[in-house]
Image (cartoon, grey):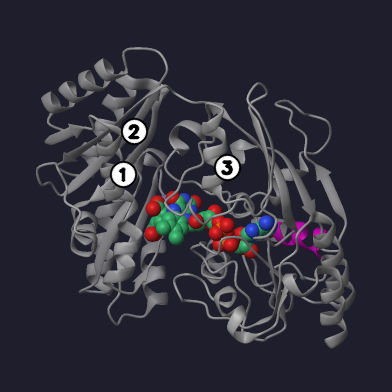
């Protein structure tokens, strides 16, 4: 092993290699502190050439590699196991924005560029990089691609996958595949880049990407409303979509319980009269008439009784204050209690009934648990997080996921499988689907060196 470490040192130098346990500590554990691991070492390359040399060396020595970006992932995908034999490869020093093209509407960035930095670069040329999530100040371009991150703008712009035009990846044996094309249309052969998007670093390393930019709407409206129940929130979604069409970028459901947590832990108050449930809606357009359309939607929704009270932000500050109520939910939950997270996708019309049945299942099998439910209603994606206080977390996963299955849903909408959901996924995907996944993994990473035990079980147990 010391040969391998000497080889790594020769590639990246002292600046790029950490072996001191104190320096490695933050890289060895996820931010929720659920998956403590022990890195063999942490390697921090500065260029694609260095990544390629590292991967070739690891391939030769059969060392497993765990890619890590901002380490904000929700599923423990970016941390090693406890064996002390897995190398963490952090992309943080590969943080150059290689170029931005406001005419072709593209941005080229290395994997370690922080999402917010890329968003700000786009805004500076009056363009929009619409991938947006509360962790955008730390999450990286490589991480959002590897997780196919969702976030709050999926309703209008799609998941991260929809924004990726070109990729540069390093394969498990160190070969570099340069697909950094900036083309909108490219149907020449297999679209292989899709295989590396959302596969959580289990097939290769993303070292750089070309992302698609969108026109930046010149007007933006943010509103918060209270609704009597989830069905009313869906009724409001229909009204809003009829009135505002594809100008709606976010349609977020927030429970009264979530807002209670945000109030308790951050002192933030909701400006809308109390309800059991709330919807935060965001719309943007460059042509006139947005405000009138939003007001018409409100009027109709009040008339129908699906909205009880509401406010439209009158300034950028007010809009940001409304968004703070939504963005602080995750941190408030972490301060409140240990929780079991569920990132579920449900066919949109079934969401109210899913909530009823999941609630009943928990009452029956895990009485006394509290649910922090919020999420991207417009995408059918709920964060149905159960505050456990003493219950067995594995039981809770099963209870909720069984209900998800009954509705034809998915046990991960956007956070991915990581190590957190490996066994649950194996239980809930058909044998042909699992066999196909194993085929892809074995073809690209036959020695199971890329992030083993994430998404799929380790090779020896498959
Ligand atoms: P990491 O956590 O470092 O890694 C995530 C996975 O990607 C790991 O499996 C890792 O091995 C792999 N990986 C990282 N970089 C690379 C690379 N260059 N090449 C290959 N594999 C790589 N997620 C959402 O989808 N929607 C949300 O709304 C959302 N909100 C969040 C809010 C908060 C407060 C927090 C803390 C997290 C949130 N997340 C959300 C989860 C997380 O931010 C995303 O999954 C994000 O995409 C992870 O980026 P990262 O750079 O931190 O990746
Ligand atoms: C969000 O939508 C994130 O804010 C985090 O996906 C969800 O904390 C969670 O479970
Ligand atoms: Zn989310």
**Looking at the image, is mark 2 or mark 3 earlier in the sequence?**
3
Relative to 49, say whether 309 is above or below: above
User: Quick one: quadrant of the N terminus?
Assistant: bottom right
> What's the magenta region?
437-445
Q: CA distance from mark 2 to mark 1?
A: 9 Å
Please tell me the numbered disc located at residue 264.
none
Residue 439 on the magenta span: yes
Q: Earlier in the sequence, mark 1 or mark 3?
A: 3
Q: Secondary structure at mark 2?
A: strand
Q: Residues within 10 Å of mark 2 (few under 14, many from 20)?
A: many
Indicate which disc, 2 or 1, sits on the residue closer to the N terminus.
2
Q: Residue drawn 61% across and 60% down? A: 69
Instruction: Please tell me which residue is depicted at 34% across the width and 33% down the height of the picture.
Output: 282
Horizontal side of 382 relative to 255 (left or right) equals right
- Residue for badge 3: 118
Residue drawn at the location 72% of the way across and 83% of the way down: 85
Q: Is residue 405 above or below residue 238?
A: below
| Residue tagged 2 | 282
Lateral position of residue 54 relative to residue 255, left or right: right
Q: Is residue 153 magenta?
A: no
Q: Quadrant of residue 46?
A: bottom right
**Which residue lies most toward the left here?**
273
């Amino acid at each position: 092993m010391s040969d391998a470490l000497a080889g790594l040192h020769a590639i990246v130098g002292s600046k790029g290699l950490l072996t001191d346990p104190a320096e490695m500590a933050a890289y060895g554990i996820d931010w929720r502190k659920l998956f403590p691991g022990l890195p063999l070492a942490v390697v921090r390359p500065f260029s694609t050439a260095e990544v390629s040399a590292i991967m070739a060396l690891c391939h030769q020595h059969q060392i497993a590699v765990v890619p890590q970006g901002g380490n904000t992932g929700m599923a423990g995908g970016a941390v090693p196991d406890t064996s002390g034999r897995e190398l963490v490869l952090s992309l943080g020093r590969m943080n150059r924005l290689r170029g931005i093209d406001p005419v072709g509407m593209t941005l080229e960035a290395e994997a370690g560029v922080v999402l917010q930095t890329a968003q700000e670069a786009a805004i500076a040329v009056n363009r929009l990089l619409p991938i947006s999530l509360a962790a955008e100040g730390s999450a990286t371009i490589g991480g959002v691609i590897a997780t196919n991150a969702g976030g709050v703008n999926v309703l209008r712009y799609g998941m991260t996958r929809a924004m990726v035009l070109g990729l540069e990846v390093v394969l498990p044996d160190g070969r570099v595949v340069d697909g950094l094309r900036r083309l909108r249309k490219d149907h020449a052969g297999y679209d292989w880049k899709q295989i590396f998007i959302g596969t959580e670093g289990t097939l290769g390393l993303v070292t750089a990407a070309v992302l698609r930019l969108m026109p930046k709407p010149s007007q933006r409206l943010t509103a918060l409303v209270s609704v009597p129940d989830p069905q009313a929130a869906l009724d409001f979604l229909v009204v809003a979509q009829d009135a505002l069409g594809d100008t709606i970028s976010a349609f977020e459901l927030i429970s009264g319980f979530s807002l209670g947590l945000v109030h308790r832990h951050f002192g933030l108050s909701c400006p809308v009269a109390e309800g059991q449930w709330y919807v935060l809606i965001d719309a943007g357009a460059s042509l006139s008439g947005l405000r009138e359309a939003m007001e018409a939607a409100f009027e109709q929704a009040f008339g129908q009784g699906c909205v009880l009270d509401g406010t439209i932000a009158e300034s950028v500050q007010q809009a940001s204050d409304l968004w703070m109520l939504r963005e602080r939910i995750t941190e408030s939950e972490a301060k409140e209690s240990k929780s079991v997270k569920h990132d579920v996708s449900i066919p949109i019309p079934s969401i109210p009934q899913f909530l009823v049945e999941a609630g009943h299942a928990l009452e029956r099998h895990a009485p006394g648990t509290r649910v922090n439910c919020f999420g991207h209603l417009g995408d059918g994606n709920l964060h149905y997080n159960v505050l456990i206080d003493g219950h067995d977390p594995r039981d809770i996963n099963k209870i909720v996921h069984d209900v998800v299955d009954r509705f034809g849903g998915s046990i991960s909408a956007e956070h991915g499988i990581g190590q957190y959901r490996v066994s649950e996924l194996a239980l809930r995907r058909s044998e042909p689907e699992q066999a196909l996944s194993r085929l892809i993994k074995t073809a690209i990473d036959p020695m199971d060196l890329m992030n083993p035990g994430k998404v799929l079980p380790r090779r020896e147990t498959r």
